[in-house]
Image: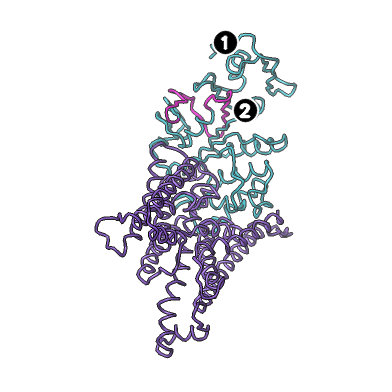
Chain colours: A cyan, B purple
Amino acid sequence: MHDSRTLVTSNLSAGYRNRPVLRNLYLAPLEPGKVTALVGPNAAGKSTLLRSLAGLVPSTGSMRLGDQDLNKLGIADRAQYVAYMPQTLPQNAELTVLEGVIGALKASPLANFEGSGPETRRRAVNVLDRLGILDLAMEGIGRLSGGQRQLASLAQAIVRAPRLLLLDEPTSALDLRHQLDVMTIVRELAREGRIVVVVLHDLTLAASWAEHLVVLNRGTVVAEGPPEEALSSSILSAVYGVEARVERCSRGRLHVMVDGPASSTELHHAN
Amino acid sequence: MTGGVLVENPAGGRHEAVLAAYERQKLRRTVVVVSLSALLVASFFFDLAMGPSSLRLVDTLRAILWPEAVSRSAAVIVWDVRMPAAIMAVLVGVALSLAGAEMQTILNNPLASPFTLGVSSAASLGAALAIVLGIGIPGVSESWIVTGNAFIFAFASVLLLQSLTGMRGAGVDSLVMFGIALVFTFNALVALIQFVASADALQQLVFWGMGSLSRATWESITILGLVIILTVPFSFGASWRLTALRLGEDRARSFGVNVLRLRFFSLLRISLLAATSVAFVGTIGFIGLVGPHIARMLIGEDHRFFLPASALTGALVMSLADIASKSIAPGVIVPIGIVTSLVGLPVFFSLIFRRRERL
């Protein structure tokens, strides 16, 4: 038996109308306190896997969070446990950063998220302070810079203090400092006892911030485990079609370096 | 609406400062809503005092408060001619603007309104069938045949839109495309009927299409009033969910909002509000688009304020348009559908330009 708070995904198939993306997927149990990164080439199924964990894509199979099967919960009940941060935050909404976060709390049909008005507002303000964007509380979402928008978006996702936090490319379009800030917060959120699953494109970023990597290709899991196990030259060659090295730097961190296209793109993989 | 400079509180009360700024913003919005209501009341009475017959504001007020104290003709003018039209202007403004506001939110499209998506074209087709070919719903009396047809067609067009979308599992963008396709289809069919119509029927149909408040009766006012009373609580009740939808569909769903159900019931409210309005007063196209836009610029998109403000701006613009329709040419009431565009457009443009400057 696993820890009663882990997420166990088994036999998961998901996709869109007439276009299955994931087939009979099994994942190692994801533990609270750890950051798991989903990596893989474009169209590998990373976002689909994340979205099916969030209940946004029709799926079959089981995803057990502790003793709950998430797929058996209604959309409102599921929102109690799971929070999802999409890649984008619409810029045309005439709402302030604070209104977005209050809206995230108030939109839920479940009473236990509602609380009294002042309580809800305090909670929203606390989250903004924690993410360092309290000064932007009354700023319109449409006027934020890319980095600020990601943080405002993250605030909406974490304000309900979910047990499972799903983030779709939270660092895309961010400069180095904002990447660092966002990933630091993501790690903190995990350390507080949450299961955090994050889709990342940058393998070096994934290797340095995630404890567990899931490498996806064409809707299946190609490799899974700690970064040093999941990332290897042969896997990168098979999955991405590149000649690449995975090396430790003088500080002991893993770095992925690409030398060129793979000489022969082999589809078999070391597992 | 953004703004509000936050002052750093040396006592560490930065949270309090933000909360206070939020409260001020809420208060400001409440003031806007109250001011819109006050303007609407003023416009309504001004509307009552206007008309081809020279009845002054004082006489009008007297006729409202003490109908026995004024001449029989004055009482008839105020109570049977001006009052129904003035009330209808307000109700139609509320209904169309609220429908437009909800539609723009659920379709995530600033150009969405009951008219851009075929509701009024459908109503015109229904009216054309009744006026020109005498085809109506069985069991509906002669005097209601045009209104009945217009309502059924308008209502059915939204249901058709829903089912087309549901059938293909298509997104909101295809819903907008279907709506535009419906506009052209219905317009072509109306043109076909016009082609075979007699001169009399053609004139009647064209006039119907222009929209007019002079058709308002206490009966039609009661019906539209009831529709508004029935739909508004549900509309306002969904305001948090609609606000969340502005943050994106996936995000709203991840908050626990059943977006499909929200959209379904919202479209149902929209079809009731728009179909009833169009059936009684004909095509009045601009309100459903401009009302929500003015409200959004004044107040932002927290739907607790946005929805009531949309309803009020719609009513105010309609009421002003009614006044204008009586004052353009002496002794003539220009069809309201023509005037709404002429009154609404300058307001709309000035707001767009003001917003540009602010950015």
In the rendered structure, the answer to whether residue B316 lies left or right of residue B276 reads right
Q: What element carries label 2?
A: loop
Residue pointed to by mark 2 = A201
| Residue bounds of the magenta highlight | A16-45
Which chain hosts label 2? A
**Residue at the far left in the pictured view:** B139
Residue A222: x %, y % from top left = 53, 18
**Residue annotated with mark 1:** A266
Q: Quadrant of residue B147?
A: bottom left
Identified by mark 2, the residue type is: His
Spot occupied by residue B37 in the image (x, y as percentages of width and height): 53, 70
Decide if residue B119 is on the left or right side of residue A97: left
Q: In which quarter of the image is residue A231?
A: top right
Local crowd size for mark 1, using a 10 Å CA cut-off: few (<14), some (14–19), many (≥20): few
Q: Which of B351 and B181 is in front in this view?
A: B181
In the rendered structure, the residue with mark 1 lies on which chain? A
- Residue B246 relative to residue B12: left or right: left
- The answer to whether residue B236 shows anywhere in this view is no
Number of other residues with Cα within 10 Å of mark 2, as a class: few under 14, some 14 to 19, many 20 or more: some
